[in-house]
Image: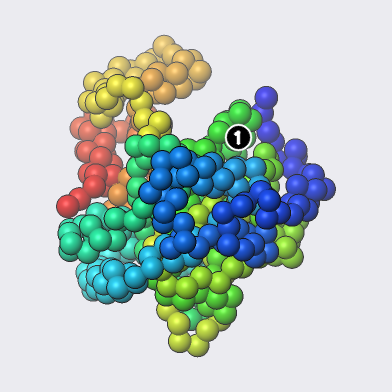
Amino acid sequence: MYIEESDCELDDFTALIDDTLTQSAVPNAAEIISNVPVYDMPSLQSKLGNPTDRKRLMAEWSDVLMNRSGVVVLRKTYADTTVIDDASLIYLNLINEEKTANTEKSDHFAAAGSNDRLWNSPQKLAGANPQVFTQYVANPAIHAICESWLGPNYQMTAQINLVYPGGQAQQPHRDYHLGFQSNASCEQYPSHVHALSPALTLQGAVAHCDMSADNGVTQFLPFSQRYLPGYLAYRQDAFKQCFNENYVQVPLQKGDSVFFNPALFHAAGENKSADVNRLANLLQVSSAFGRAMESLDRQAMCRWVFPALKQAVKTQQLSQMELEAVIAATAEGYAFPTNLDTDPPVGGLASESQQQLLKRCLVDGVSEVDFVHALDALSNKKRALC
């Protein structure tokens, strides 16, 4: 079964989001604000330290993320915010260093100039100050909620987002994986992949300053993750309007965190404050299962196969369908993971993939030498740098 844009029905969507989160569904929550359960983490430390209680709490979180409002707030994730301040200072210095070096940045959902991004914040913090990094990531609450959604052996990535006064609100959207695909691309994936995609990642944010509606704390539409065609719906005007009429915002204090299902409709709010630079560490955590069983040197495979493919195209030995099958078996089809400092998205939400490069070079009829150079350049752009 496949989903198309025409399958998106606003009435079906509004019926799903017209729901209420009850306290009985979240017994460990300290309160519920606008259908968002709020957990007081200092009072839950003993439960995190008990394997049975920890598992029950994690089950509650995963139930909220999957079946209920789709978002949870963890109050005082960092009860002592000294490490937040230490990390913030390092992050701001790194942002200034990269700006001084004229490193061009891009953002997936925000207008250019309204914010600064620091991609790959964990690696950069670890390199700048291993002691602060160790203190920052030594957080049992974050570890537990990541495991609650993804299980063990998850892969942590994160990006610093600094939004200045006047920074406009983001467009409502869903996140990685399918949230970073165009609608045309999403339509190529069967419906069960639309249902599966959210289970592969967890979105979160650590507040590095106090956040309110005035300075643009994130807007959420509770229960919207339950709408299966949502990856095709969020760009449609009727759904944008519905989001703008129904979203909620929960204020955060420095050291709080928020975690949400990546299929939840959400958007960073407008920074209407006069003097608050809104600073957050955006956590994008991935399942251990998002990996192939074997390691293949696809760059070498592309080099070896390119002359034969070029000859086959020239002599029409392969049909278009056969050519597509060869490319799919040879080259890496996904643009991620990549180094977003050196390989930013161009003209969309993702950079060029190896398959796209191979197809482009075949169409353009480039020489074997030029193809190898282009292939090496693409690999170098995607490589993580120390």
Residue furthest right as drawn: 11
Residue at 33% x, 22% y: name it: 293
Describe residue 261's horizontal placement relative to residue 289 as left or right: right
- Residue placed under numbered mark 1 in the picture: 195
Describe residue 333's horizontal placement relative to residue 35 as left or right: left
- The scheme the figure's colours follow is rainbow
Describe residue 128's horizontal placement relative to residue 139 as left or right: left
Is residue 347 visible to the viewer in this orientation of the structure?
Answer: no
Residue furthest bottom as drawn: 274
Q: Residues within 10 Å of mark 1 (few under 14, many from 20)?
A: some
Looking at the picture, tell me which residue is in the foreground, 240 or 352. Answer: 240
Is residue 297 visible to the viewer in this orientation of the structure?
Answer: yes
Residue 122: image quadrant is: bottom left
Q: Position of residue 113 (x, y in %)?
A: 43, 72
Q: Position of residue 365 (x, y in %)?
A: 34, 31
Looking at the picture, tell me which residue is in the foreground, 114 or 12. Answer: 12
Please, what is the three-letter code of the amino acid marked with disc 1? Ala
Is label 1 in a helix, a strand or a loop?
helix
Q: How many marks?
A: 1
- 312 up-or-down from 108: above or below: above
Q: Position of residue 238 (x, y in %)?
A: 75, 56
- 59 up-or-down from 77: above or below: above
Looking at the picture, tell me which residue is in the foreground, 137 or 265. Answer: 137
Describe residue 249's horizontal placement relative to residue 80 as left or right: right
Residue at 51% x, 70% y: name it: 252
Residue at 74% x, 59% y: name it: 242
Residue 291: image quadrant is: top left
